[in-house]
Amino acid sequence: MSKLKPQRFLTGITTTGTPHLGNYVGSIRPSVAASTGDGAESFYFLADYHALIKCDEPARIQRSTLEIAASWLAAGLDPERVTFYRQSDIPEIPELTWLLTCVTAKGVLNRAHAYKASVDKNAAAGNDPDADVSAGLFMYPVLMGADILMFKAHQVPVGRDQIQHIEMARDMGQRFNHLYGEHFVLPQALIEESVALLPGTDGRKMSKSYDNTIPLFAPREQLQKLINGIVTDSRAPGEPKEVEGSALFQIYQAFASDDETAALRKAYAAGIGWGEAKQLLFERIDREIAPMRANYLALMKDPAKIEATLQAGAEKARRLATPFMRELRQAVGLRSLATQAGTQAGKVARAATSAFKQYREADGKFHFKLLDAQGQLLLQSPGYDSPREAAQAIALLQSQGMAASGALKPVAGVDVAAVDAALGQLAASKG
Ligand code: TRP
């Protein structure tokens, strides 16, 4: 394999609610599996600042944070291999949120799905468009942008509903880079096509908002009871049944091997009774979950241990965030007054040195130009037939200065000495 830079994966879990089987199949299980692979660096965090947008019950936020942390650890997330932390332990996140807020167009946030859905709902009900809409909901994409950009994530595994937020994070990063220099990696959304949405007990997507979830670590008896409550039709034992549209079958498939799934498919055709099918499903899920459930219960009895794990994760995360935030503050001009470095121009961070820019014109020819540290045009080349020829002309200038310029002349109002000075500065900056 070629030597690629390790890809960095990052994802956040909003700390409202108790993890259910849908979260396990759609997020926890694939994330834990991915984090054990080589060549990947994984960042997982508890998005508790995000939780405040949806939830004003302090006890619920705390409880959910504990349950989610315990669930991920019980499911095999290794905090030694990954960076596992709580968002609110990283003060640099809200700090970055503000810097990004200042480069984000309000109009873009107006179009964010979550905010727009609330506004549309209000409009439909004849209410004020912003009734019950907090500024937190409005700003949500910027906080999420800070989560992602802070750690230079390449890939962000999310559900489809989050794609727009990742695109917004890209735009914020791009805009910031354009204004202040290349600081951010532009992230990509990673959508797991193969992970099917798990249906809930009523056949609709398993979701807290439908009240149809099966908690991941429900005690055995409760698990059995909830599985018995999965909707089926009224066909009696002995009557052939279809797997299409069967929530029971789909949930089974999410846990079973291909062979096991094929066997259940056959059993459906042969008229397995619903009671028997539910028993199979219960046993299959419990086989996978039971060892984790034991870990989970042990962890839940020792919250201080989880807290210590999260503190260690925060320390690891801040080893990146603290110096990066220092760099970003410097870039935007939040600087010590004792150092006068950047006083002459606003955008020195980006254009601290002169630069060659190569480009192609509409005539198909390859050109370059030389700009000084302030972005002023010094030199403009004629068109070359190939990028190679343009590059050779640049190389000649760099090694021998304007003495070797041939037909190249500075633009009007610039003298040869100024071009040589810029070339010298460029050489020094690369030294
Ligand atoms: N908003 C995401 C959700 O509701 C959670 C989240 C917060 C997140 N910050 C993130 C996901 C950063 C990925 C990256 O699912």
Image (spheres, rainbow, N blue to C red):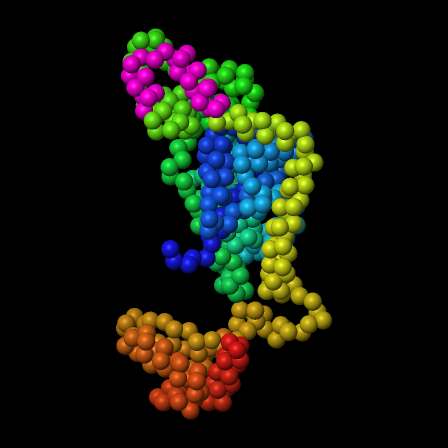
Residue 191: x, y in percent? 41, 42
At horizontal 51% and vertical 27% (from top left) the residue drawn is: 289
At horizontal 41% and vertical 29% (from top left) the residue drawn is: 254
Whether residue 274 is visible:
yes
Residue 205: x, y in percent? 43, 27
Quarter of the image containing the N terminus? bottom left
* 126 sits to left or right of 270: right
Q: Is residue 143 magenta?
A: no
Q: Main secondary structure of the magenta part?
A: helix
Q: Nearer the viewer, residue 140 or 195?
A: 195
At horizontal 42% and vertical 73% (from top left) the residue drawn is: 357
Residue 145: x, y in percent? 53, 50
Q: Relative to 272, is 47 above or below?
A: below
Q: Relative to 339, is 107 above or below?
A: above
Residue 188: x, y in percent? 44, 50
Whether residue 208 is visible:
no
Residue 198 location, quadrant? top left
Q: What residue range appears in magenta?
A: 262-287
Q: Nearer the viewer, residue 344 or 340?
A: 340
Residue 359 location, quadrant? bottom left
* 283 sits to left or right of 304: left
Q: Nearer the viewer, residue 346 or 281?
A: 281
* 384 sits to left or right of 313: left
Residue pushed farthest bottom? 403
